[in-house]
């Protein structure tokens, strides 16, 4: 006869077996769910890469408005793509989603340099030679006027550089500078008339590039931005002078104003655009990819000369350019201060003044150079400056607004991702 205690043993064994079976079922369920999620993640990653490639190869206007579509016919995976101008560069956003899973990335894109148009120096042929003196160094190819390039003795300086003067190919330039992209210039000009919200009294503002641009408008009130941290999808606009203090922290933002003043010691990464002047103090550091641009349309009826000026010991990695649509009147002036370093590209539709010990690691296009001594001005003179194409990073990408840009685009900077 079986003892009653045996029944308890059977029940316990049955419970253990049931728990083991339940555990096996749960493990199988979660393993399958995890496997499916991993598969969706891999598929979403592939879709995200496809979306990135589509944005890099599409024409500029193809995704100005956000578009959502299924990547494969009849599939249950979808993409949302958008590519919009952000200053002189483009911002792209890609979202890949399937069921409740979503991956996204936002990034900046720019153009590779067109090697057939690239040179460390381009001076159009205006029947005037280019004169060099002192320890001037020109490394790389150069487009020069028919009058050529010559050594001169000026301001107690004799030429002390390489006898070839240009250590690279010498080619004849045309009568005019290669133009900037006028369509992009017109789009940038529209932002000088934009309106936005009142600037909040916050110490830190961050705006995602996945949402709408936060536009802050200072109106006609002269303002100094100080002790503020501004990052991301932010645009500042003013109808008068806007001052950026050295205590301000700016990352990837845009600024539009008639006059912009940057105080000495500023460090940041931003794009500044003005109609009248941009004044940068001493020892400022603009990280890549930054930009300074003067854009003056024929509607501007002011009598003074538009100008970009950098004081002593400042550095900038990116683009500096000046543009004026009217051929008449004072053409823009760009002044690069003593011992400044520019890593990138300078385009001056008017005059470019390079003071002593300036280093340009990249390329320069200008209608003419200006040298200013204590007593007089000299046109198309370079004294104690260094123009060096080899000083530019092989990974450098230029803005599509420049004449050296190729049609091929690459990712310039990753901004946000999940």
Image: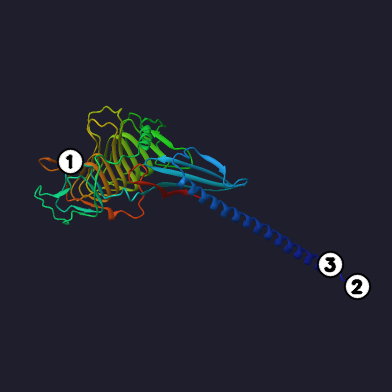
Please identify the quarter of the rendering in which residue 12 is found.
Answer: bottom right
**Separation of marks 1 and 3 at Cα, in angstroms:** 113 Å
Task: State the mark number for residue 7.
Answer: 3
Task: State the mark number for residue 127.
Answer: 1
Point out residue 223 in the picture as x, y percentages from the top left corner: 32, 34
- Secondary structure category for the residue under label 1: loop
Provide the residue designation for mark 2: 1
**Separation of marks 2 and 3 at Cα, in angstroms:** 12 Å
Is residue 31 found left or right of 337 in the rendered image? right
Front in this rendered view, residue 278 or 186: 186
Q: Quadrant of the N terminus?
A: bottom right
Residues packed near mark 3 inside 10 Å, few (<14), some (14 to 19) or many (20 plus): few
> Is residue 244 visible to the viewer in this orientation of the structure?
no
**Separation of marks 1 and 2 at Cα, in angstroms:** 124 Å
Residues packed near mark 1 inside 10 Å, few (<14), some (14 to 19) or many (20 plus): few
Q: Looking at the image, tell me whether mark 1 or mark 2 is earlier in sequence order.
A: 2
- The residue lying at 10 percent from left, 47 percent from top is 155
Point out residue 33 in the picture as x, y percentages from the top left corner: 65, 55
Indicate which label's residue lies in the foreground, 1 or 3: 1
Please identify the quarter of the rendering in which residue 378 is found.
Answer: top left
């Amino acid at each position: 006869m079986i003892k009653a205690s045996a029944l308890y043993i059977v029940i316990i064994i049955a419970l253990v077996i049931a728990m083991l079976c339940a555990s096996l079922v749960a493990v199988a369920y979660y393993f399958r769910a995890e496997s499916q999620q991993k598969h969706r993640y891999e598929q979403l990653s592939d879709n995200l890469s496809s979306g990135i490639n589509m944005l890099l190869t599409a024409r500029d206007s193809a995704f100005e408005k956000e578009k959502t579509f299924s990547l494969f016919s009849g599939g249950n995976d979808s993409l949302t793509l958008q590519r919009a101008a952000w200053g002189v560069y483009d911002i792209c956003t890609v979202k890949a989603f399937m069921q409740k899973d979503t991956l996204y990335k936002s990034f900046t894109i720019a153009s590779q340099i067109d090697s057939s148009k690239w040179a460390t120096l381009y001076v159009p042929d205006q029947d005037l030679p280019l004169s060099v003196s002192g320890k001037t160094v020109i490394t790389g190819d150069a487009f020069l006027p028919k009058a050529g390039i010559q050594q001169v003795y000026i301001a107690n300086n004799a030429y002390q550089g390489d006898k070839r003067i240009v250590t690279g190919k010498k080619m004849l330039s045309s009568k005019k500078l290669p133009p900037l992209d006028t369509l992009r210039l017109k789009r940038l000009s529209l932002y000088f008339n934009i309106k936005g919200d009142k600037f909040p009294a916050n110490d830190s503002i961050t705006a995602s590039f996945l949402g709408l641009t936060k536009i802050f408008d200072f109106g006609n009130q002269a303002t100094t931005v100080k002790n503020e941290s501004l990052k991301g999808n932010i645009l500042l606009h003013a109808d008068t002078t806007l001052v950026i203090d050295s205590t301000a922290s700016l990352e990837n933002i845009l600024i539009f104003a008639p006059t912009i003043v940057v105080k000495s010691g500023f460090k940041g990464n931003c794009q500044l655009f003005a109609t009248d002047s941009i004044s940068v103090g001493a020892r400022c550091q603009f990280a890549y990819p930054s930009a300074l641009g003067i854009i003056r349309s024929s509607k501007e009826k002011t009598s003074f000369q538009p100008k970009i000026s950098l004081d002593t010991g400042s550095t900038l990695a990116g683009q500096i350019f000046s543009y004026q649509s009217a051929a008449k009147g004072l053409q823009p002036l760009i002044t690069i201060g003593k011992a400044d370093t520019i890593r990138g590209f300078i385009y001056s539709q008017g005059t470019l003044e390079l003071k002593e010990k300036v280093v340009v690691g990249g390329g320069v296009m200008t209608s003419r150079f200006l040298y200013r001594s204590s007593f007089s001005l000299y046109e198309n003179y370079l004294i104690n400056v260094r123009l060096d194409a080899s000083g530019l990073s092989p990974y450098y990408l230029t803005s599509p607004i420049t004449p050296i840009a190729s049609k091929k685009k690459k990712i310039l900077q990753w901004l946000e991702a999940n």
